[in-house]
Image (cartoon, rainbow, N blue to C red):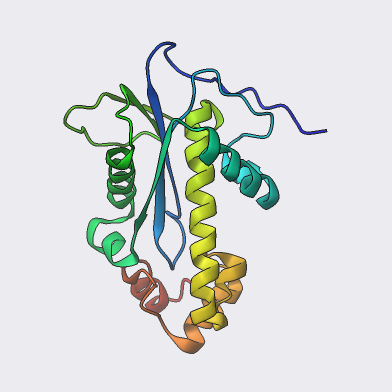
């Protein structure tokens, strides 16, 4: 029997809200994904939660439900090159803003997971620490961002199988770190994350 998660359907009843979240701030390789989702005000599902707390199977199944039932949704990819240029924090903000702008319906309020965002002309927003475990729309955005990113890392793993990205999703696992030492960096690695750490032996 699925565990019932008590997420709030919305922050302000009667207001069209978009939840925003990202996936992939911590990996050494691969893009960051951001998503924005507008759910019906009374949307409920017992398995919807912060994507990090869900099984891969539940995430995949919830993605189908979210994409079918959302009023609007959008997913945005931020490349490793952009992450190196902007830094990962502001790259995640940029990704969420792009996702919001791609929504087919303009929200009256943006609910952002975390505590950092930048003003957007014509949009109101509020940041919510642990928002993906608080509001359904943010949790839904976390599911989309995570599943789309995982799919991308499995795709990139076909090009560079020696790094194990289909298993580690680009995160700094021992397998991934050893592969970097042996084979070097790929075009999909985040340069700003690597050289100094390798030079001073943080991966030893």
- Extreme-left residue of the structure: 121
Quadrant location, the N terminus: top right
Q: Nearer the viewer, residue 139 or 181?
A: 139
Residue plotted at (30% across, 42% down): 102
Q: Position of residue 28 (x, y in %)?
A: 44, 66
Tell me: 47 left or right of 113. Answer: right
Could one spot residue 172 in this view of the protein? no
Residue plotted at (41% across, 53% down): 33
Vertical position of residue 3 compared to residue 83: above or below: above
Q: Position of residue 121 (x, y in %)?
A: 16, 31
Q: Nearer the viewer, residue 68 or 170?
A: 68
Q: Position of residue 106 (x, y in %)?
A: 29, 29
Tell me: 2 left or right of 60. Answer: right
Q: Quadrant of residue 167?
A: bottom right
Vertical position of residue 135 compared to residue 144: above or below: above
- Extreme-bottom residue of the structure: 182
Residue plotted at (53% across, 20% down): 9
Tell me: 55 left or right of 142. Answer: right
Q: Quadrant of residue 42?
A: top right
- Extreme-right residue of the structure: 1
Q: Position of residue 160 (x, y in %)?
A: 50, 81
Residue plotted at (53% across, 26% down): 134
């Amino acid at each position: 029997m699925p565990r019932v998660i008590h997420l709030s359907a919305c922050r302000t009843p009667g207001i069209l809200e978009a939840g925003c979240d990202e996936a992939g701030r911590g990996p050494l390789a691969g893009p960051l994904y951001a998503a924005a989702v507008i759910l019906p005000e009374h949307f409920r599902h017992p398995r919807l939660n912060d994507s990090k707390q869900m099984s891969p199977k539940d995430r995949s199944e919830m993605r189908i439900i979210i994409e079918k039932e959302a009023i609007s949704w959008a997913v945005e990819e931020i490349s490793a090159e952009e992450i190196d240029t902007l830094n990962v924090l502001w790259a995640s903000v940029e990704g969420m803003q792009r996702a919001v702008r791609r929504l087919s319906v303009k929200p009256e309020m943006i609910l952002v997971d975390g505590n950092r965002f930048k003003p957007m002309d014509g949009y109101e927003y509020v940041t919510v620490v642990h928002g993906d475990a608080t509001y359904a729309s943010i949790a839904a955005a976390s599911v989309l961002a995570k599943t789309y990113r995982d799919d991308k890392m499995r795709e990139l793993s076909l090009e560079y199988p020696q790094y194990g990205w289909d298993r580690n999703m680009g995160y700094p696992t021992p397998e991934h770190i050893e592969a970097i030492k042996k084979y070097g960096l790929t075009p999909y690695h985040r340069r700003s994350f690597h050289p100094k750490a390798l030079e001073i032996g943080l991966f030893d």
